Amino acid sequence: MSNWKLINKTYLYDGTFQGFLTLVFDSYATKTLPQKIVPQDIYVSNFLDQTQIIQTNHSKAQRVLTRN
């Protein structure tokens, strides 16, 4: 994990398991670790947060689930 970088972003996802797996896929693909991971429906806006919305992608989620 030495080549991973911690980024100052909050990842927002739809709160589903598939959405979380998509987030894991994207994080692994870019080798970045967000500061926070929060479902969109419970996120409380903060002017210091830089947010990135992760759209659920079922094929990415399936790849994480099956590790293919």
Image (cartoon, helix red, strand yellow):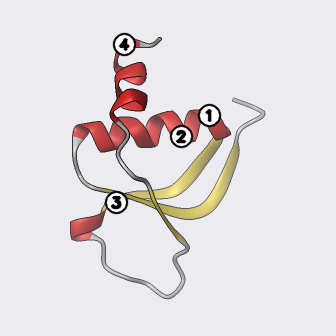
Whether label 2 touches label 3, CB < 8 Å: no
Say whether disc 1 or disc 3 marks the residue closer to the N-terminus.
Answer: 1
Q: Nearest to the eye among marks 4 and 3: give it.
A: 4
Q: Establish if 49 lies above or below 2.
A: below
Using residue 62 as the reference point, say whether residue 24 is left or right of it.
right
Q: Amino acid at mark 1?
A: Ala
Say whether disc 2 or disc 3 marks the residue closer to the N-terminus.
Answer: 2
What residue sits right under mark 4 in the picture? 66
Task: Determine the CA span between mark 4 and mark 3.
Answer: 24 Å
Q: Residue at horizontal 34%, vertical 20%?
A: 65
- Residue 56 in the image, given as x and y percentages of width and height: 35, 45
Whether label 1 touches label 2, CB < 8 Å: yes
Nearest to the observer: residue 16 or residue 44: 16
Q: Amino acid at mark 3?
A: Val
Identify the element where label 1 is drawn: helix
- Residue 13 in the image, given as x and y percentages of width and height: 34, 55
Q: Amino acid at mark 4?
A: Thr
Q: Establish if 28 lies above or below 12.
A: above
What residue sits right under mark 3 in the picture? 38
Q: Quadrant of the N terminus?
A: top right
What residue sits right under mark 1 in the picture? 29
Displayed quadrant of residue 64? top left
Whether label 1 touches label 3, CB < 8 Å: no
- Residue 53 in the image, given as x and y percentages of width and height: 44, 62
Whether label 2 touches label 4, CB < 8 Å: no
Displayed quadrant of residue 18? top left
Q: Residue at horizontal 35%, vertical 23%?
A: 62
Task: Determine the CA span between mark 1 and mark 3.
Answer: 19 Å
What residue sits right under mark 2 in the picture? 26
Task: Determine the CA span between mark 2 and mark 4.
Answer: 15 Å
